[in-house]
Amino acid sequence: MSYPDITTAISLWQESISGNCSWNKEKSREYIYHTNGVGDAAFKIAEHCGMNSEKAYALGLLHDYGKIQNEKESGIAHFIYGYNEMLKKGWDEVAKICITHSFPNQHIDFARYPKYNQKDLQSAQDIISTVQYDDYDRLVQLCDMFFEGTKKMSITQRIAGIQLRYNLRKTQTDELEKYALANKKYFDEKCGCDIYKILDM
Ligand SMILES: [Fe+2]
């Protein structure tokens, strides 16, 4: 299993920023804020609970690498594109995060992705059904919750944003919130404090 050092992670991240030609300035700004925020938050929490903070940073920074391409135009979801690209580059731990960060409960709701290639979704489901989620998967899933647009926010605020953006049913967002809050509790206990304090929230 492997992941890039910080210098390599940052250069891959820069490649992902300049790679998506369909983004306007605002979209790029949001991507930069979000991924940088997830990387930083993962670093800080990892440092507090004795995990490898440089690894957490690299995985957090690159979890959305698949957004280098326009998923709506290509029909390839960012979690699948990122997974394949990172495997090609030999960073299999980043590949794993690219896919696991989107599915905290190890299950893909196919109806949520009608525009994506269904065969791709099935192979993504096959991957997440067989991999073992570890603390790095859980950490990036958690930190992914705190940054949307160019704002840092609580899990509850982020879930409300996701509900609006994807027009999800209440049962779907309730499930997302349940997993996210359980995940936060896991890291609160692991760190011995409320992680919102570590993140100045
Ligand atoms: Fe993300």
Image (cartoon, helix red, strand yellow):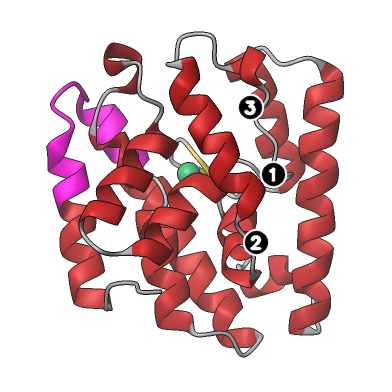
Residue 101, can we see it? no
Question: What's the residue at 66%, 85% (across, down)?
Answer: 49
Of residues 73 and 124, the one drawn nearer to the viewer in this rendering: 124
Q: Are marks 2 and 1 in contact (CB under 8 Å)?
A: yes
Res 3 visible: yes
Which amino acid lies under the numbered mark 1 shown in the image of this protein? Gln
Query: Can you say whether 28 is above or below 86 in the image?
Result: above
Question: What is the x, y in percent for residue 34?
Answer: 42, 47
Q: Position of residue 53 (x, y in %)?
A: 47, 82
Is 51 in front, or is 44?
A: 51
The residue nearer to you, when weighing 198 against 116, is: 116
Instruction: Tell me what residue is drawn at x 79 percent, y 14 percent.
Output: 169
Q: CA distance from mark 2 to mark 1?
A: 9 Å
Q: Under tag 3, what secondary structure?
A: helix
Quadrant containing the N terminus is bottom left
Q: Position of residue 19 (x, y in %)?
A: 14, 38
- Residue depicted at 13% across the width and 41% down the height: 18
Q: Are marks 3 and 2 in contact (CB under 8 Å)?
A: no
Q: Is mark 2 within 8 Å of ligand 1?
A: no
Q: Secondary structure at mark 1?
A: loop
Q: How many marks?
A: 3
Going from the N terminus, do you reach mark 3 or mark 1 first?
1
- Kindly identify which residue carries mark 1: 106
